[in-house]
Amino acid sequence: MAEIRILTPQQLEEREQKPKGRSGRRRSEERTRIIEEYKGQLESVEPGFGGDVILGNDEDKRTVRQNLKTAAQELNMALEFRPIKDKSRIHFRVITPEVAASKPKRGGRPRKNQP
């Protein structure tokens, strides 16, 4: 049989309170360290610069790309990644956040036209 638990109005109010501070999952210490290293390397670059990332044997392309994007966002930059078939390398170009925002989003289903 299911267990029923009765809550007081005060308990209901506490439950419905929005959490204070940062919501979502916290960043691990290792990821924070990696992002800080990437930020140190990206600090001196400006829009128009580019780069290559050569991945180690134990690194995942998607994880490295996401960490690079996060580091660039924290420095108020944006990265444009170029497709490449080599699974051990990543090509990118540094662009301004305004240019990144003006680019159309890729993929997805088109919206329905509302009558």
Image: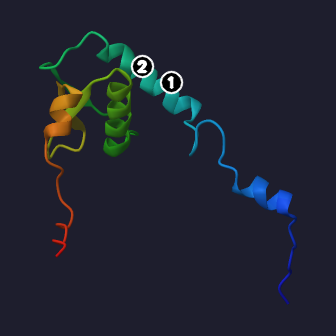
Q: Is residue 92 visible?
A: no
Question: Vertical placement of 40 versus 50: above or below?
Answer: above
Q: Amino acid at mark 2?
A: Glu
Crowd tier of the residue under label 2, counting other residues whose Cα lies within 10 Å: few below 14, some 14–19, many 20 or above: few
Q: Residue at x 17, y 26 (%)?
A: 95
Q: Is residue 112 visible?
A: yes
Image coordinates for residue 25, horizontal then vertical, percent: 57, 44
Q: Amino acid at mark 1?
A: Arg
Image coordinates for residue 74, horizontal then vertical, percent: 39, 25
SS class, disc 1: helix
The C terminus lies in which quarter of the figure?
Answer: bottom left
Q: Residue at x 21, y 63 (%)?
A: 108
The reply to whether callout 1 and callout 2 are in contact (CB within 8 Å) is yes
- Give the spatial CA distance, label 1 vs label 2: 6 Å
Callout count: 2
Q: Quadrant of residue 76?
A: top left
User: Which of the two residues, 37 or 17, is positioned nearer the viewer here?
Assistant: 17
- Image check: 12 left or right of 8? left
Question: Vertical placement of 114 versus 83: above or below?
Answer: below
Most distant residue in the bottom direction = 1
Image coordinates for residue 44, horizontal then vertical, percent: 27, 9
SS class, disc 2: helix
Residue receiving disc 1: 33
User: Which of the two residues, 96 or 88, is positioned nearer the viewer here?
Assistant: 96
User: Which of the two residues, 86 or 31, is positioned nearer the viewer here?
Assistant: 31
Residue receiving disc 2: 37
Q: Residue at x 19, y 72 (%)?
A: 114
Q: Residue at x 17, y 43 (%)?
A: 86
Q: Which mark is residue 64?
A: none
The N terminus lies in which quarter of the figure?
Answer: bottom right
- Image check: 81 left or right of 70? left
Image coordinates for residue 61, horizontal then vertical, percent: 31, 42
